[in-house]
Image: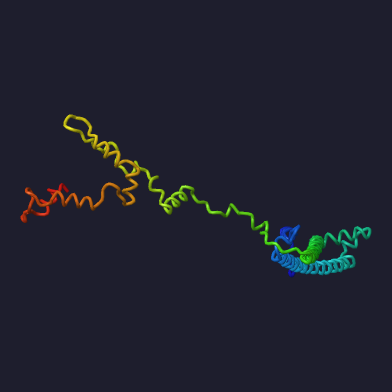
Amino acid sequence: MSELPEINSSAIDAVFSILSKMEVELDEDPLQFGPKRLNSKVAETRRLLTDCESLFLKVSQWLQKYRAAYRTLEVELDLEKKQLFANDPEVRAGRNVADRDALATMKLREKAQAISKVAQTQADLESLLTVVKAKRVDLKDLQTRLKDQINLCREEIALGGKWGSKSSPEASKVDLDSAPNVDKKTLRDLQNMFLGTGVAELDVSIASPSSDSLQTPTTSDGVVSDASEESEESEDSPDNFATQFSGKSSDWDSDNFLEDLSDSYSPGPSNSKVSESKTVEDLLRDLDL
């Protein structure tokens, strides 16, 4: 009994689950998908048939072992019963054969339970082997159907048909669960960055100073200067901010600044020559820097 494989309900359910997955669907028109798809189905059917054959051999081996064990245990039980009938006084005290057989069976209860368990497993393996045989016949029939499809394709090609290149239905299905989850805002920011159109969409309120920190310049009469309003509007406008951000300027550049600086310090009656005794701090103070 020790060499017997352990066959329980979970092992039998696992075999049934494997058999249920051995399926290959035939195409209604295999010519439109090309010869590769038909060849792959032939190879897949051959692989499933090989797996089914190996499973059939394994179940047959289990069944053979349990049948041999059942016959051995049955012979041992019969011999021990006959020994009790002949030598045991309690069994021989029975009034008839049925009583003697019942007394002997009760004395050999453990061996009788072992025989019953082996017989039950043997019946399960026989049922399982029947299902494996049915699946093997089904796969062989599928292999024959594929051969018929190949012959039909050859006849259609002989009549002027051609192999198609249509993609298989499995390839056209998109697995949405495996697609990466990317934030839409991140995609929009990346697109604007590569296209160079995202500068104008920046938050101006973050880049420009707040209204509380600004000091409105006024004239001596207490009236707000128009030039200061225009400068504030030009500085706070998104277009001006975008221009400064991109490093371009339309009304002011370094060349104009240098020309103004050279004009303001051009030789004349008032500043014909800069004193050599002036320091760098005095020059910066004169330039209001």
Looking at the picture, the colour scheme in use is rainbow
Q: Which residue reaches farthest front?
A: 268
State the image quarter where residue 78 is shown.
bottom right
Reply above or below: 277 against 233.
below
Q: Which residue reaches farthest right?
A: 96
How many numbered marks, from 0 up? 0
- The residue that appears at 26% across and 50% down in the rendered structure is 253
In the rendered image, the quadrant that contains the N terminus is: bottom right
Q: Closest to the observer: 158 or 98?
A: 158
- The residue that appears at 46% across and 50% down in the rendered structure is 186
Q: Closest to the observer: 69 or 11?
A: 11
Residue 50 lies, in percent from the top left, at 74, 68
Tell me, yes or no, if residue 119 can be seen here: no
Residue 128 lies, in percent from the top left, at 79, 61
State the image quarter where residue 93 is shown.
bottom right
Tell me, yes or no, if residue 202 can be seen here: yes
Report the side of 100 relative to 145 (left or right): right
Residue 221 lies, in percent from the top left, at 17, 29
Report the side of 254 relative to 115 (left or right): left
Report the side of 205 relative to 134 (left or right): left
- The residue that appears at 46% across and 47% down in the rendered structure is 185
Residue 41 lies, in percent from the top left, at 72, 64
Reply above or below: 245 against 125.
above
Reply above or below: 156 against 252.
below
